Amino acid sequence: MVRGLDLTNGKQRWEVDLGIRFDLSTELDPTTWVGDMVAVPDSREVSGLVWTGAAGGTLYQWAVDVGEGRVSWTSPIPGTPRPRLGTSSCDAQLTATHASLVLVTCRTTNEPGEVQNYDVSAVSPADGTTQWHHLLPVPPKLQRPEYPRDGFGMLPDGRVVTLMPQPDGTCSPIMVGTTGILSRPIVAGPTAASVADTKKVTCDKPAVTVADGRPIFSDNTRLFALN
């Protein structure tokens, strides 16, 4: 249930029953099927995630017009089966810009030790139309339930950034957006010490945030930023 409250007195103005749109009758633990909810800046739209047991695990995205208290649209995220949401399986991240709703979530792996595909995608807040959608191969060392939420950051233009191991053994930022998945190798400074520092960056437990439009990275040991 999604409810809208009056800011002046806290009284309920409207409610939307998502159970009418999705079959939630067999889902007993809300922490595994209710995901992020975000507000689209300067609009009346709020969007969120719902997991259901359909087809072995299906993830849906929805949007509500908070001015009218009605569902604007719902859409399944392509690909099944999917793991449940939450910190015990896949803590999906949903963020919003004026023009896009950007999702980072994971697909079910077949065997331990295999590469796992993550969906990194953007849709229009107005109607859920796909703007771009890429499958990002994630190596076993990064496959943690919190990685979709903590390991990715969204830039003001809607691109998503994270740290990812590279074929040459280094760890580099990558950017995902309309042009695909692009690596951004860390450029060393002019001194030998700066070259050595870039080689120390690992992908052991990456975390990313964005401050003043600039991505800030942590590899669980050090902090650094990209220009």
Image (cartoon, grey):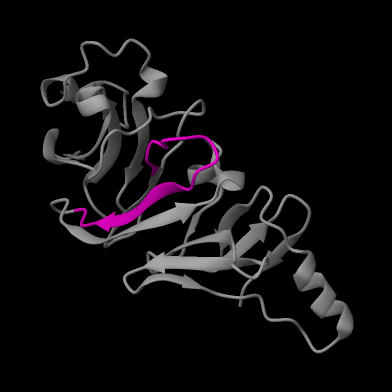
x and y percentages locating residue 71 in the rendered image? 12, 36
Q: Is residue 173 left or right of residue 96?
A: right
Residue furthest right in the image: 193
The quadrant in which residue 6 appears is top left
Whether residue 109 sits left or right of residue 128 in the image: it is right
| Above or below 201: residue 125 | above
Measured as percent of width and height from the top left, residue 23 is found at 16, 19
Whether residue 98 is visible here, answered yes or no, is yes
Identity of the residue furthest to the bottom in this view: 190
Q: Is there any visible trace of residue 95 in the rendered image?
A: no
Closer to us: 64 or 151: 151
Near-viewer residue (133 or 93): 133
Which segment did they paint magenta?
106-125
Examine the structure image and report whether residue 24 is included in the region drawn in magenta: no
Is residue 121 on the magenta stretch? yes
Q: Position of residue 61 (x, y in %)?
A: 24, 40
**Residue sitting at x 66%, y 47%:** 205
**Quarter of the image containing the N terminus?**
top left
Left or right placement of residue 216 versus residue 137 in this view: right
Which residue appears at 40% of the width and 48% of the height? 117
Count of numbered marks: 0
- What x and y, as percent, mark residue 36? 38, 36
Residue at 30% across / 35% down in the picture? 49
For the point 26% across and 36% down, the residue is 80
Vertical order, 100 against 68 (above or below): below
Query: Residue 170 versus residue 3: which sits nearer the camera?
Result: 170
Quadrant placement of the C terminus: bottom right
**On the image, which quarter does residue 215 sit in?**
bottom right
